[in-house]
């Protein structure tokens, strides 16, 4: 097979994944659940395998807190969403979950997937390494998470196909195909500022991919968007999902301290050995990333001062 024909085959493979290209509007919380389930998925899992998700694990990996009510609403909505899969022979309607159980007072939930969704989730997971799944969890924008899904499918090619702008908006549920709901970000400057530019910034900062995009025009009208993708050296050490909860928490805390410039061995050990300080560290990093804390010059010094360590 020639290089050109191999690339064409790769292009064909990457042009369809039922979950990536489906038209749905998952919240950041729902996408965190989806990526976490993907991290647990293994090829030899039985059809009735139940996936145990500890809420603290998601909090430790993302720096975000989802309360019990938010999670219940998120999984209820995910379970009711229909994915449409169509080819020349068949049109399918499939759903995500067989059931979801919340174990009261234990801090975790058990998810059993629909057997019909499994092949599409395996296909989706094949686009990601363990590090990339961790990267997806670190993104705060739901649009960044969706665009990261798209970009990951094309990382070996260097650029995505050109997405028709209307199809792209429908995919991200910025536009209602029935026309009953108002379209979001109709103005191209709004689309760039609220969706595309935020996604590019977060993906480039937090993941193994460096992306950019180009809007396509026909006359005066914008008609399409193409993403350019290249791999970059990850800025963080990968967190393995096979680690214990304590290992994951400590590793992520070390990364946060390093990013803040807190590298003195005794000071690091003091913070890592005290659960309260680690909790405060995760809260501080979340507030820093969401601009709820302003510390452009010395965020590490501010954290230490707030905790009475300086």
Image: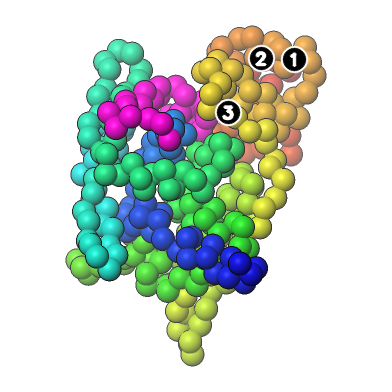
Residue carrying label 3: 240
Q: Quadrant of the N terminus?
A: bottom right
In the image, residue 42 above or below residue 153: above
Image point (63%, 23%), residue name: 251
Image point (52%, 78%), residue name: 216
Front label number (3 vs 2): 3
| Snapshot quadrant of residue 72 | top left
The answer to whether residue 60 is magenta is yes
Residue 60 x/y as whole percent: 51, 25
Assign a secondary structure to mark 1. helix
Check contact, mark 1 vs mark 3: CB within 8 A: no
Image point (67%, 33%), residue name: 237
Asked if residue 111 lies left or right of residue 212, the reply is left
Residue carrying label 1: 267
Q: Is residue 76 visible?
A: yes
Residue carrying label 2: 271
Asked if residue 202 lies left or right of residue 112, the reply is right
Check contact, mark 2 vs mark 1: CB within 8 A: yes
Q: Which residues are magenta?
A: 43-67
Task: Compare residues 282 and 228 and report the one nearer the observer.
Answer: 228
Count of picture labels: 3
Front label number (1 vs 3): 3
In the image, residue 175 above or below residue 291: below
The answer to whether residue 68 is magenta is no
């Amino acid at each position: 097979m020639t290089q050109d024909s191999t690339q064409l085959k790769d292009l064909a493979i990457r042009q369809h994944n039922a979950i990536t290209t489906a038209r749905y509007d998952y919240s950041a919380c729902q996408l965190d659940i989806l990526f976490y389930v993907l991290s647990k998925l293994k090829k030899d899992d039985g059809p009735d395998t139940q996936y145990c998700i500890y809420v603290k694990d998601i909090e430790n990996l993302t720096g975000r807190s989802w309360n019990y009510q938010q999670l219940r609403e998120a999984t209820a909505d995910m379970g009711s969403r229909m994915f449409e899969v169509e080819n020349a022979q068949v049109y399918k309607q499939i759903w995500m979950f067989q059931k979801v159980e919340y174990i009261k007072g234990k801090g975790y939930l058990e998810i059993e997937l629909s057997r019909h969704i499994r092949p599409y989730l395996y296909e989706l997971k094949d686009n990601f390494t363990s590090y990339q799944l961790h990267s997806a969890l670190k993104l705060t924008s739901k649009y960044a998470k969706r665009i990261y899904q798209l970009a990951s499918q094309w990382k070996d090619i260097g650029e995505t196909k050109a997405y028709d702008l209307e199809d792209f908006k429908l995919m991200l549920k910025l536009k209602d195909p029935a026309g009953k709901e108002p379209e979001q970000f109709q103005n191209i400057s709004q689309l760039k500022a609220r969706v595309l530019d935020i996604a590019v910034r977060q993906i480039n900062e937090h993941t193994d991919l460096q992306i950019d995009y180009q809007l396509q025009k026909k006359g005066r009208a914008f008609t399409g968007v193409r993403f350019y993708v290249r791999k970059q050296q990850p800025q963080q050490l990968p967190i393995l999902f096979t680690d214990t909860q304590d290992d994951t928490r400590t590793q992520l805390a070390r990364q946060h301290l390093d990013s803040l410039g807190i590298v003195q061995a005794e000071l690091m050990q003091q913070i890592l050995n005290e659960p309260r300080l680690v909790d405060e560290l995760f809260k501080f990093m979340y507030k820093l990333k969401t601009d709820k804390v302003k510390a452009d010059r010395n965020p590490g010094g501010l954290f230490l001062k707030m905790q009475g360590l300086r």
